[in-house]
Image: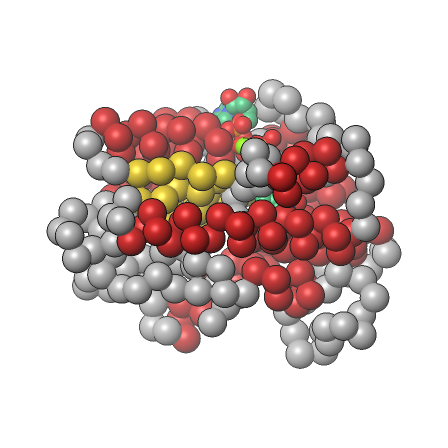
Amino acid sequence: MSTSRRGAFIVIEGLDRSGKSTQADVMLDRLNASGISAKLMKFPDRTTAIGQMINAYLQSKADLDDHVIHLLFAANRWELASTITQTLESGTHVLCDRYSFSGIAFSASKSALKHKEAIPTPSSSDIPYTNPNLSYIWCRDPERGLPAPDLTLFLDISPEAASARGGYGEERYEKAEMQARVREVFGQIGNEMLSHNQNEDRSEPTKDGAQPRWVVIDAGNDKTTVSKDMWAHVEPLIAGVDSPIGRLWY
Ligand code: Z5A
Ligand code: MG
């Protein structure tokens, strides 16, 4: 990559058991095998002090207020935000297994389910701070300003197909009703990201290779097909990115 270019920030998002971690490893190996410098990060990062509190919560060893755990997930990203930025600026690509979009999707879904509400939408009627529950906007606010991905690959799979895969059901949020809600909120986030692209006239790849920011991948396919579909969107970015690192929702 030319020295003036920075690394690309590529986020892999998706429903539980959609194959994010599997595909993140495959992509890292593929990049490294081609001599391309890339770093894999994962959220939650359970190795930090905050990450250990999150881990205890996810394994139901600790109970936390819904607002508190939401802010801890966001804080876990903020404590690693400068690492992401420095890595990208050094010319290394960052692959990230889950990011802010999981943060919003899980907290907003949990709150809506608990209070038997419809999923809160990102509309002007959703007034933050007067809604006692975790509204979409309330959940999004602590994520504002974090490094923005250049590309988000959203691995989509039906909750039924996901539940047939190994290891499902061991952690706190791995329940069918919750997963269906999470999928709905991810859909909203995708629409919001795509309309943002259109506002910036970025709905189609531009001539300098810039990608739409949110791409849905059919994760119900076999592993090789999923890898191939993802790579088609990553490949144009491996020469590096000219534009400065964006900030989420700015
Ligand atoms: N969470 C949150 O609430 N707020 C936040 O801000 C963040 C997260 C960041 C733990 O996350 C929880 O934290 C999660 C969201 C919440 N809630 N839940 N539940 P995590 O990332 O640590 O979760 P995980 O334990 O890594 O699981 P996962 O991410 O859901 O799985 P995955 O990475 O998508 O799938 P996988 O491990 O790659 O594959 C699962 C299995 O399927 C495995 O046996 C594979 O071999 C198999 N697999 C993978 N791909 C395929 C295909 N294509 N075909 C067939 N089988 C496949
Ligand atoms: Mg995973």
Image quadrant assignment for residue 198: bottom left
Q: Does residue 78 appear anywhere in the picture?
A: yes
How far from the left and from the top, in percent, is residue 35?
19, 32
How far from the left and from the top, in percent, is residue 84?
40, 49
Residue 199, placed above or below residue 78: below
Q: Residue furthest left?
A: 2
Which residue shows up at 66% across the image and 49% down it?
72
Total labels drawn? 0
Q: Residue furthest right?
A: 115
Quarter of the image where ligand 2 sits: top right
Residue 229, placed above or below residue 106: above
Q: Residue furthest top?
A: 166
Residue 214, placed above or below residue 60: below
Which residue shows up at 49% across the image and 60% down it?
146
Which residue shows up at 47% across the image and 53% down it?
81
Q: Residue furthest front?
A: 49
For this view, does 191 lie left or right of residue 70? left
- How has the structure been colored for display? secondary structure
For this view, does 48 lie left or right of residue 168? left
How far from the left and from the top, in percent, is residue 28?
34, 32
Q: Nearer the viewer, residue 133 or 117?
A: 133
Which residue shows up at 86% across the image and 56% down it?
115
